[in-house]
Image (tube, grey):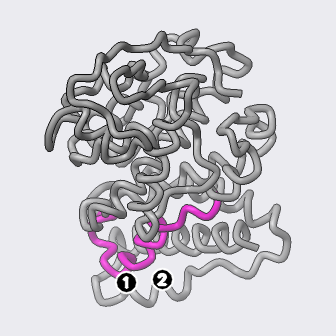
């Protein structure tokens, strides 16, 4: 039923956008609202018919110009439902990710249409992302990064490692508005600039040594608890970090992004906020080899 509701929402939204575009081009401003009412599609009885209709109409939205989207002021509340609606991603994670964070990519591939639908929702919703709270933006981009990473793997599946894919983090495969984006854009130009170092334990690189892919989508309402839990889980995983009072054998994530963890003190200060053991400021720090094998 959740998927059906999402499909209906997108269908109504896209039909309204199409009606609005036609009205903007051919009619006075005062006729806009009437066009939206009259262009709502007929009730479609079968879910498969709705899905086909959605796919067709969503593709058509790529031709809508920024000026037309900007003029759709009466759609703003509807658009916000797209940023905040991560139910479909939540269902996919619950279905295809284990408690340990192992990902069933074969299972995901069978639900690739649902993943594509969710990514289309993200593309629609991001157009007003700057108007949202920091928490909603963080949840949106964390979920987006993870969904696109899964999509990247599925585009190249089967593969033994994400690093076997040519330029995996630099491929511009997804168009958000007028910009073709890659994973590096989202991580380095958006998420890291939001000054929340715990994002490094929420976004995943589809590899064994990465933080695990969570079984639930991130949401603004639960973000603080989810980020804290993800950080504590990663630190307590002895396959990724070995922590004692005076000896640390850490994931290379802490070396690669050291500057992010030292925003409010030393790396040891950050670790002591979330580790189960009180770590000495003079602890010896080493870094583990990184296992890039696929996290399946």
User: Which quarter of the picture shows residue 223?
Assistant: bottom left
| Magenta residues, dominant SS class | helix
Is 41 left, or right, of 162 in this rendering? right
Residue at 41% over, 22% down: 250
Give the image location of residue 168, x and y in percent.
48, 19
Is 98 left or right of 9, judged from the image as shown? Answer: right
Q: Nearer the viewer, residue 172 or 46?
A: 172
Residue 56's disc is none
Q: Tell me if residue 175 can be seen.
A: no
Residue found 28% across the figure and 83% down from its top? 29
**How packed is label 2: few (under 14 Cα within 10 Å), some, or many (20 or more)?**
some
55 in magenta = no
Which quarter of the image is occupied by the N terminus? bottom right
Q: Over which residues does the magenta segment extend? A: 68-88
Q: Is residue 75 magenta?
A: yes
Numbered tag placed on residue 32 in the rendering: 1
Q: Is the C terminus in the top left, top right, bottom left or bottom right quadrant?
A: top right
Q: Position of residue 66 (x, y in %)?
A: 29, 56
Indicate the quadrant where residue 71 lies: bottom left
The image shows residue 44, relative to residue 196, as above or below, that is below
Does residue 214 appear left or right of residue 73 in this picture? right
When asked about the image quadrant of residue 213, the answer is top right
Q: How many marks?
A: 2
The residue pinned by badge 2 equals: 36
Tell me if residue 75 comes above or below residue 157 in the rendering.
below
Up-down relation of residue 160 to residue 10 (above or below): above
- The answer to whether one can see residue 249 in this image is yes
Classify 151 as above or below 37: above
The answer to whether the residues at label 2 and label 1 have Cβ atoms under 8 Å apart is yes
- Helix, strand or loop at disc 1? helix
């Amino acid at each position: 039923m959740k998927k059906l509701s999402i499909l209906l929402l997108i269908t109504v939204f896209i039909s309204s956008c199409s009606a609005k575009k036609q009205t903007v081009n051919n009619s006075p401003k005062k006729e806009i609202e009437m066009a939206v009412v009259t262009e709502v599609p007929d009730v479609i009885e079968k879910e498969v018919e709705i899905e086909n209709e959605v796919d067709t109409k969503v593709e058509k939205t790529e031709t809508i110009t920024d000026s037309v989207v900007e003029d759709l002021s009466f759609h703003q509340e509807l658009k916000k439902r797209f940023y905040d609606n991560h139910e479909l991603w939540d269902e996919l994670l619950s279905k295809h990710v284990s408690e340990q964070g192992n990902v069933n990519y074969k299972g995901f591939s069978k639900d690739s249409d649902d993943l594509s639908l969710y990514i289309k929702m993200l593309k629609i919703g991001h157009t007003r992302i700057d108007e949202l709270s920091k928490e909603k933006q963080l949840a949106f981009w964390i979920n987006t990064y993870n969904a696109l990473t899964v999509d990247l793997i599925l585009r190249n599946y089967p593969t033994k490692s994400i690093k076997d894919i040519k330029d995996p983090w630099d491929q511009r495969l997804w168009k958000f508005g007028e910009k073709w984006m890659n994973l590096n854009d989202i991580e380095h130009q958006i998420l890291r600039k939001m000054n929340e170092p715990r994002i490094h334990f929420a976004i995943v690189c589809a590899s064994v040594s990465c933080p695990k892919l969570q079984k639930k989508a991130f949401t603004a309402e639960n973000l603080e608890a989810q980020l804290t839990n993800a950080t504590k889980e990663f630190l307590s995983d002895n396959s990724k970090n070995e922590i004692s009072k005076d000896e640390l054998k850490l994931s290379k994530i802490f070396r690669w992004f050291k500057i992010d963890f030292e925003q409010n003190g030393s790396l040891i200060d950050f670790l002591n906020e979330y580790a189960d053991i009180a770590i000495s400021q003079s602890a010896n720090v080493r870094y583990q080899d990184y296992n890039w094998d696929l996290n399946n």
